[in-house]
Amino acid sequence: MTWISKAITLFGAVLLGHACYSAQEHSALQSFKAATATLTSSSLAVASLPVDIAIETVIAITVILFGLVLGTRPLRPIQWRVWAGKIEREGEEGFMDNDGEVNKDFVGNPFKFLETRPGFVDIRKQRKEFASWVKTSSTQ
Amino acid sequence: MAQVPVQTIHRDPQLFYWILLPITAVMILTGVLRHYATVLMASAPKRLDQKTTREQRALLHGINVRGNFHTLAKPSFDVRRDALTTAYESGAYLKSPENRGQAPPNPLSDPSSMEGMMGMMKNQMAMIIPNTLIMSWINAFFSGYVIMKLPFPLTIKFKSMLQAGVATKDMDPRWMSSISWYFLCIFGLQSVFNFLLGSDNAASQMAQQMGGMAPNAGQMFGPGVDPDKQFLAEAENLAVIEHYSVLDGVEQRLLEGIKV
Amino acid sequence: MSAEREFQIVPIVQEAVVHNSRTLLNLQSLTASLFGVGAGILGLESYSGFLFYVVCSLLTAMLFYVVRVAPTSLASDANGGGGAFDTSRYFRSQVEFWTGGLMNGLAGFILTWTLFYGLVRA
């Protein structure tokens, strides 16, 4: 995902740089012509930009814009219940950056503490698990 | 030919390389430098002794109870309120109970409070010194040049600001001198810093000015504030709360949410 | 009172709000400089330049909506049935989402616009 956006942005930047250079050369050439032909003022000559450069600029901007938008980080739901539901369902994968790393301000599941709360612990199940663990370790 | 002829001024292209680029580069580098200087100069939070911490935490406890009372059941809220109010009014959490009722000490004489002020001073200095230096540098070297033309027309009032040092009466206010490029850089380089240094950088001056205006959390326990008065005010705030719970009428809301 | 109650019943995750608006702000300040480059190359002047900026930032918001907001907010039924162009899943105010970029990037836009206008029309 991220290399696509980077490649698109780079391509657009190359286009934009080329357009900028062309426009600069064009205006330099025009003013040079005007100076040699001793026209009244150079402003008449510089006034218009060739259509192809204009089109190239607009396309370059659109391409870069697309690349930049693709490169933004994923958003997070702001409502607590939606956000918590997302964490419950997706865990850390819901908070990946574009680079595939877990975001560093991801604090973990906010409902994790409910599992370890004394009132919520299933003591019988834990006891059963412990008994079976003792049994398996004693038979070996 | 009713159109007013456009003013054209032939400028040396070398102006670009010797004025515009240096100013821009210096502005960007100063921003980066300021960011790292602020990071380096940031003093670690001061260690507080146990009594002070208790005092501050007790006050925060009261504030949090007041802010989140709707998640507590009525009995538990009442118990908390009673305990906190009595403790506040008796001054149980005060750092020095014997000083109750006395005027707070002068903040300037207290050495511990001086440090906080020094921190603020350092931040201010990191802002002001580079700006003054650069401005006088530009004024000394680059004043009197017209380097650029703004792409949009302005009224005549901007002339004195944009064309400082260029004493030409008839010139269009769109032409700007180097000092106005400097001002443009101050305001416009925000996004460049955003890109270079990440969004929570110290170089962005606007954010700093905003932060200076907003009351930060450290202000609450700042020097010169009487904790006893804060406690009494907090006790009063707690006493006037009319308790309700978010769970009031939750069955109704649940039933409404269920679509058959 | 009732608005406050509503807010307490449906709480908002503050970190997520900050994260979202920072993401949007980064994009806006970057693209504003980009539009300045474009306007400078095209040689736009006065009103047409500002118009270009407004149109482009609305386009940015639109593209951002299509890429980042729409796929999830339209799929979920939890957004209260706001329909298309509803950003309440990720942003607290719609106005901030659609027009916030105009103010945030204006200074950067003018800077690069002036710079490239001067560069190209030297």
Image (cartoon, helix red, strand yellow):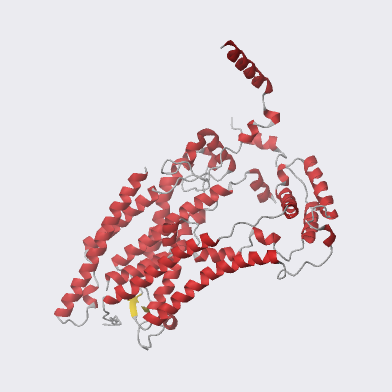
Q: Residue at x 41, y 44 (%)?
A: A98
- The answer, for residue B109, to whether it is visible in the render is yes
| Residue B228: x %, y % from top left | 80, 59
| Residue B36: x %, y % from top left | 48, 61
Measured along the vertical axis of the image, is residue C60 above or below residue A35? above
Q: Residue furthest left?
A: A37
Q: Residue at x 17, y 81 (%)?
A: A39
Measured along the vertical axis of the image, is residue A72 above or below residue B144? above
Measured along the vertical axis of the image, is residue B87 above or below residue A134? below
- The answer, for residue B173, to whether it is visible in the render is no
Measured along the vertical axis of the image, is residue A83 above or below residue B182? above
Q: Is residue B145 left or right of residue C4?
A: left
Quadrant of the drawing holding the C terminus of chain A:
top right
| Residue C33: x %, y % from top left | 38, 62
Q: Residue at x 81, y 43 (%)?
A: B79
Quadrant of the drawing holding the N terminus of chain A:
top left
Asked whether B129 or C104 is in front, the reply is B129
